[in-house]
Image: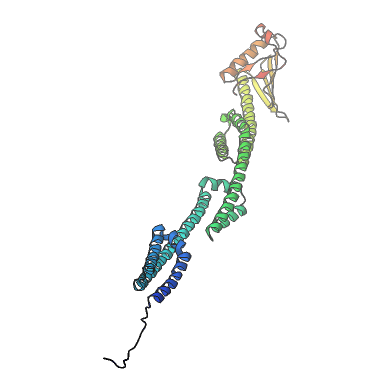
C-alpha cells in the first residue's frame, strides 16, 4: 500500500486551565466581599454564620485545587447564594437591632420624662410650691417640663437633667421658706397662749351679751388654731391681735358691770340695814352713796370704778356703835354675795383686826 497519502493533524485544546484561571480570578471578588462584609455577618449573625460563609468559599478553593472547574463554578455559585443570604439576614438583623435600640432609647427618654412628671405631680410638693413660689416661676417650670420629651435620648437626657436641677432648687427654696415660716409661727405660740388665758379669766356672766362674747371668743380661737395648724403666720398674728382686743374690750365691760353691781349691792345693803340712801355719780365715775338713819346715824360711801376700794365715813352721834354698824353692813353684803374686808378701821378699830391694819379699804366679792 505504497503511494501518496493524506492526513489532518490537530493539537487537542484543553479549556480546563483557562477556566480554572477564570474561576480563581472570580474568587477574588468573593474574598473582597468577605473582607468587606464578614464583620457585618459576624456582628449580627454570629461566628457560626461567618464560618458558613468561609466554608462556602473554601469549597470553591477545593475545586480549584482539584482542577475541577465544572464543580468549582457550581461551588462558586452556591457560595454567592450563601453570601447573599447571609448578607440579607445580617441587614435584617441590623435593622431589627437598630429599631430595638431606637425603641429602648425612646422608652428611656419617655422614662426620663415620666420621672420628671412624677416629681412635678407630687401633691405635697405642689402645695409647698404654690404657697411659697412665684406663679411665674412655676409657669416656667411647667412649660419647660412639656418640652423635655422632645428630640433624641441625648437631648431628652440633657433637658431632663436641667429640669430636675431647676425643680429641686426651686423646691429647696420653698422648703427653706416654709421652715423659716414654721419657726416664726412657733414663736407666736406663747403670745397665743397668753391671749387665750387672758380671755379665759374673763367672767362675762354679768354682761347681757355674754353669749355673743362666748361665740366670738370661740370663733377667734378656732381661727387661731387653724392658722397654727396651717402655719399661716399672718393670719395667726391677726388672730392673736383680735383675741387681745376682745379681751381688752370685755375686761373693761366686765369691770364696769362688776362695779355697777357692787355699787347697787352696797346701796341695797344699806337700805336693808335701815338707811335712807341717796346716790350721785361724780364726773370721773365715782359713785357716792349718802345714807342716813334717824335720828343719829349717817354713812357716806365712795366707790371708784377704777379700783375696788371703798371709802366709808360713818357718823354715830352716840359714838359707840360705829364698828357694829359696819359689821352689820358686812353681814348684809355677805348675805347678798359680796365680801367687804375692812383694812382700815380708823379710830376705835376692833382688836381682832389690829394686826392687819392698812391705809386703804378694799372690797372683795364676785370676781
State the residue at coordinates (41%, 65%).
92
| Residue placed furthest toward the top | 351
Q: Where is residue 45 in the image (x, y as percent from the top left)?
A: 41, 60
Q: Is residue 268 shown left or right of residue 24? A: right
Is residue 238 at least partly visible in the picture? no
| Residue placed furthest toward the bottom | 3
Q: Quadrant of residue 207?
A: top right
Q: Quadrant of residue 174?
A: top right
Q: How many marks?
A: 0
* Above/below status of 364 relative to 155: above
Q: Is residue 74 shown left or right of residue 308? A: left
Q: Position of residue 240 (x, y in %)?
A: 62, 36
Quadrant for the N terminus in the image: bottom left
* Above/below status of 80 relative to 247: below
- Foreground pick, 358 / 200: 200
Q: Position of residue 74 (x, y in %)?
A: 35, 72
Quadrant for the C terminus in the image: top right
State the residue at coordinates (34%, 73%).
70
Amino acid at each position: 500500500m505504497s503511494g501518496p497519502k493524506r492526513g489532518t493533524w490537530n493539537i487537542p485544546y484543553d479549556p480546563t486551565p483557562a477556566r480554572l484561571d477564570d474561576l480563581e480570578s472570580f474568587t477574588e471578588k468573593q474574598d473582597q466581599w468577605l473582607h468587606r462584609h464578614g464583620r457585618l455577618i459576624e456582628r449580627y449573625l454570629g461566628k457560626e454564620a461567618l464560618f458558613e460563609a468561609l466554608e462556602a468559599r473554601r469549597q470553591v478553593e477545593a475545586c480549584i485545587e482539584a482542577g475541577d472547574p465544572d464543580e468549582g463554578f457550581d461551588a462558586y455559585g452556591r457560595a454567592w447564594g450563601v453570601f447573599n443570604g447571609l448578607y440579607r439576614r445580617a441587614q435584617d438583623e441590623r435593622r431589627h437591632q437598630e429599631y430595638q435600640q431606637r425603641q429602648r432609647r425612646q422608652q428611656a427618654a419617655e422614662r426620663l420624662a415620666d420621672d420628671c412628671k412624677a416629681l412635678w405631680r407630687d401633691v405635697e410638693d405642689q402645695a409647698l410650691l404654690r404657697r411659697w413660689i412665684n406663679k411665674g416661676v412655676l409657669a416656667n417650670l411647667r412649660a419647660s417640663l412639656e418640652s423635655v420629651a422632645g428630640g433624641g435620648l441625648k437631648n431628652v437626657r440633657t433637658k431632663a437633667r436641667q429640669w430636675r436641677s431647676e425643680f429641686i432648687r426651686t423646691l429647696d427654696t420653698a422648703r427653706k421658706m416654709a421652715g423659716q415660716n414654721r419657726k416664726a409661727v412657733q414663736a407666736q405660740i406663747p403670745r397665743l397662749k397668753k391671749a387665750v388665758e387672758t380671755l379665759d379669766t374673763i367672767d362675762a356672766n354679768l354682761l347681757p351679751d355674754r353669749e355673743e362674747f362666748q361665740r366670738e371668743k370661740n370663733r377667734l380661737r378656732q381661727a387661731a388654731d387653724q392658722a397654727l395648724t396651717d402655719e399661716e403666720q399672718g393670719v395667726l398674728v391677726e388672730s392673736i391681735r383680735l383675741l387681745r382686743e376682745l379681751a381688752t374690750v370685755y375686761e373693761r365691760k366686765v369691770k364696769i358691770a362688776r362695779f355697777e353691781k357692787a355699787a347697787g349691792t352696797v346701796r341695797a345693803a344699806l337700805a336693808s340695814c335701815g338707811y335712807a340712801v341717796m346716790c350721785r355719780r361724780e364726773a370721773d365715775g365715782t359713785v357716792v352713796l349718802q345714807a342716813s338713819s334717824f335720828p343719829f346715824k349717817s354713812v357716806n360711801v365712795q366707790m371708784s370704778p377704777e379700783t375696788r376700794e371703798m371709802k366709808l365715813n360713818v357718823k354715830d352721834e352716840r359714838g359707840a356703835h360705829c364698828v357694829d354698824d359696819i359689821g352689820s353692813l358686812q353681814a348684809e353684803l355677805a348675805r347678798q354675795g359680796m365680801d367687804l374686808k375692812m383694812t382700815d378701821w380708823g379710830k376705835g378699830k376692833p382688836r381682832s383686826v389690829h394686826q392687819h391694819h392698812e391705809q386703804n379699804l378694799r372690797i372683795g366679792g364676785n370676781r
